Each structure stands twice: as C-alpha cells, then as structure tokens.
Image (cartoon, rainbow, N blue to C red):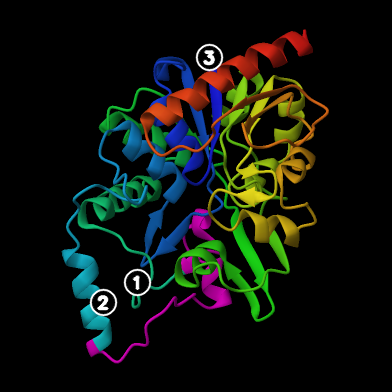
Amino acid sequence: MTTFLAGGTGTPKLLAGGREVFDPADATVVANTGDDVELGGLFVCPDVDTVLFEGGGVLDRETWWGIEGDDATTHDYLTDLSREAGIEPGPRYLPDDRQTAGRDLARWRRFSAASEFMFIGDRDRAVHVLRTSLLDEGNSLTEVTRTLADAFDVTADVVPMSDDPVATIVHTPDGPVHFQEFWVAEDGEPAVEDVEFRGADRAAPSDAALEALRDGPVVIGPSNPVTSIGPMLALDGVREALRETTVVAVSPFVEDEVFSGPAAKLMDAVGYEPSTAGVADAYPFADAFVLDDADNTSLDRPVVRTDTEMNDDADAERVARACQQAVERASGEVA
C-alpha cells in the first residue's frame, strides 16, 4: 500500500503515468481541501476533483481542471445575466457573518455566484450539486468523496485530508483573500505577506487519511509545499504520523527555479527559501527526495535524480519509478 499526498496538479500527473509502478488498487490518495470553496451554495473541491476526474478518465488534461469537453451553458448564461443585472465582475466574497452561518464545512470560503470567477462546466457543476446534496443529507466529506469515486470507477481510495473546515487564506498588503481568489481571480499577482490555514487548529485529519499516513509509505508529488501540502501538515497528528513512516518527496524546484505556480512567492512569504533546499526544510520528516538531473542541491538525506518534468504519461512513469527507487532506499535507511 502506498499513500500519496495530492494538491494541485503535480501528484495527479504522477498518478496518471505511474499506474504500472504503483498499483492504484493498492494506493490511497489524501487530497488537500484547504483550496475548497462554496460558490453559489455549491461545495467545490478542486484538488479532490482533479484526482477523481483523472482516475475516472474524464479530466481535461489541457488545463488539469474540470471535465474534458464539458459544456458551459450555465456558466456562460450566469455570466451574461450578471452583466445585464449590472453586477460588477470579479470575486464576491460573502460578508463575515455569512462565512460561518449555514453549512459548517464551507466556513471562511463562501463566494456568491452572482459573479462566478471560477469556470465550472455543466457536468462539473453536476458533481458539485451531488456532493453538496449528499453533504446536506448528513454524510461526511470522506463518505461523499468515496461515493463519487465509485461513480467515476476510480480504483484508488481517494479521501479528503479532513472532514472539518480548513480554509487557505493568503494575506496581502490589501488584506486577506482566499487562495482561489489569489490564484484564479488575481492570477497570483498580489504580494504575499503570510499564509494562514484558518480552522486548522480546530480541525482533525479524517480517520481514513490518518490511517493511510500511518500505513505508508508516503509519496509527496511535486506540489506547492505551502498551499497544496501545508494545510495537511497544519492538522494535529499529521506531522507525527509522517515522522513514523517512510516519506519520499519530489521537489517542485530545480535548485531555485520552480516548474510552475506560485510556490516560490508563497514559500518566501512563510519563511522558507524558495528552492529545493527550502522544500527539504519544509519537509523535515521526509526520508528521501527525488530531484531533477539538473538539480545539484546537496541534501542530508538520500536523493534519487531523474528528469522530473512531466509533460506526458511517459514522463510521469519515469518520475514514479524514481519515487519507487527512493522509497526502497529510504526504507533501507529507516530499517
């Protein structure tokens, strides 16, 4: 059994090409939920859904978001209707008193759909309608995620990091914004002063997630250490579980150059050097690392090097085999 921590697109890409290396039937994927939002009353789980859609063979691999070939009738008409109603475009974060009222799981991340700043296709929206309805019937996010995984015939066990609300909030000079507003609406442009995982001090990892972490080994794909993996690490008991099992991490950097996304800016804001060395500092529990061939960073733990850029499934399989080799080396070190 192998457990993967998934946030963003790095780990889903690794899973997509690594099926011959890591059998999905023996894999658990613990997905970040700090990026989740409630948009127009619908509960949206971006990192969970990327794993579900990829495992179900419907993911749009051009964007690594949403369902391939999805229609956008509702989204487009909603945008047109809002414009005709004189509603200004852009994210409409609900007032503070509405952030903690209603569905508890959605607190601190509620947006109006009067200006739908995230693109949601029609079939994608149906997933959110079903998820929200099952949550409102009293099911946990873990139960709902497994139900959706069955609907998509996903072989791996996909579970959320927590059944409790945790919201990734980016603090900027103009005030705090939810990560989705920072990244989707603002394209990651605002300066970052700090990153907060609101609610993490009161949240617990889901039982399924914690059990998977303890069973290990654990593979962390080339994800953003702050906003993709950080919310998981902020939960009580997660770091302790990772210290007790074999952990391998793939660096999203080549020395101080990040492959994609806002990882460098976010790491600098929270006090880590934006580099592979900084990733190693952020993951003191990691027993081994997979680095790019061009990355000459010297670490105090075992390193396996390969070309870590993943443009297709063949690339991802190569990185997965390097992860397997790193797990074997780290297991030997742990033993």
Report the span colored magenta. 84-110
On screen, residue 138 above or below 23: below
Residue 236 in the image: state x and y as whole percent: 73, 39
Which secondary structure type mostly characterizes the magenta part of the structure?
loop
Residue appearing at x 73%, y 29% in the figure? 286
Q: Label 1: few (<14), some or many (≥20) within 10 Å?
A: many
Residue in view at x 33 percent, y 77 percent: 114
Taking the magenta stretch, the answer to whether it contains residue 105 is yes
**Residue pointed to by mark 2:** 79
Of marks 1 and 2, which one's residue comes earlier in the chain?
Answer: 2
Q: Which three-letter amino acid code belongs to the residue tagged 3?
A: Met
Q: Is 290 or 78 nearer to us in this picture?
A: 290
Element type where label 1 sits in the image = loop
Q: Distance between the residues labelled 3 and 1?
A: 40 Å
Q: Distance between the residues labelled 1 and 2?
A: 7 Å
Three-letter code, disc 2: Thr
Of the 4 image quadrants, the one containing the C terminus is top right
Q: Which residue lies under the disc numbered 1?
A: 116
